[in-house]
Image (cartoon, helix red, strand yellow):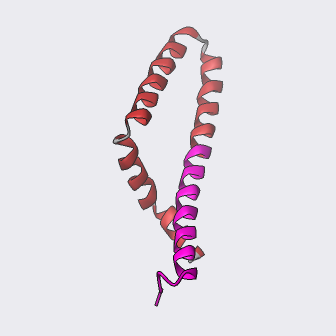
Amino acid sequence: MEKLIREIIDSGLLRYEIDMQLRKDAVYTKDVRDAEQLHAYIEKNISEEQRMVLDDYEAVVRSANARAQELSYVLGVRNTIAYLQQTNALKIV
């Protein structure tokens, strides 16, 4: 099962599904709009060097959050399957 989980993450299919669901979430979309407004404000009010540092920081934070999100989702699915197997509610052939 671990190999299958890794293949799902690496394929990008999970990321696509998550993105589609996030676009439907009102809280998430508001946060994205707020972040875009703040980013535009920052762009106007800081130096090029400061902007490069903030852009690098933002990229690292986004990457870490995306990875944590994917792993959390996959672990939730894996734990659900394991629980269903333990209770004999699901049999994998």
Quadrant including the N terminus: bottom right
User: What's drawn in magenta, residue-wise?
Assistant: 64-93
Residue beneath the point at 61% across and 12% down: 47
Residue 76 against residue 88 in the figure, above or below: above
75 within the magenta span = yes
Residue 7 against residue 91 in the figure, above or below: above
Expressed as whole percent of the image width and height from the top left, the position of residue 67 reads: 58, 51
39 within the magenta span = no
Expressed as whole percent of the image width and height from the top left, the position of residue 38 reads: 50, 18
Q: Nearer the viewer, residue 6 or 78?
A: 78
Which image quarter: residue 29?
top left
84 horizontally vs 68: left or right: left
Q: Which secondary structure class fits the magenta region best?
A: helix
Residue 66 against residue 12 in the figure, above or below: above
Expressed as whole percent of the image width and height from the top left, the position of residue 4 reads: 52, 74
Q: Nearer the viewer, residue 34 or 54?
A: 34
15 horizontally vs 2: left or right: left
Residue beneath the point at 41% across and 26% down: 33
Farthest residue to the bottom: give it.
93
Marks counted in the figure total 0
Residue beneath the point at 44% across and 30% down: 32
Residue 30 against residue 78 in the figure, above or below: above
Q: Nearer the viewer, residue 45 or 61?
A: 61
Expressed as whole percent of the image width and height from the top left, the position of residue 70 reads: 54, 55
64 horizontally vs 39: left or right: right
Farthest residue to the top: give it.
45
Residue beneath the point at 51% across and 70% down: 7
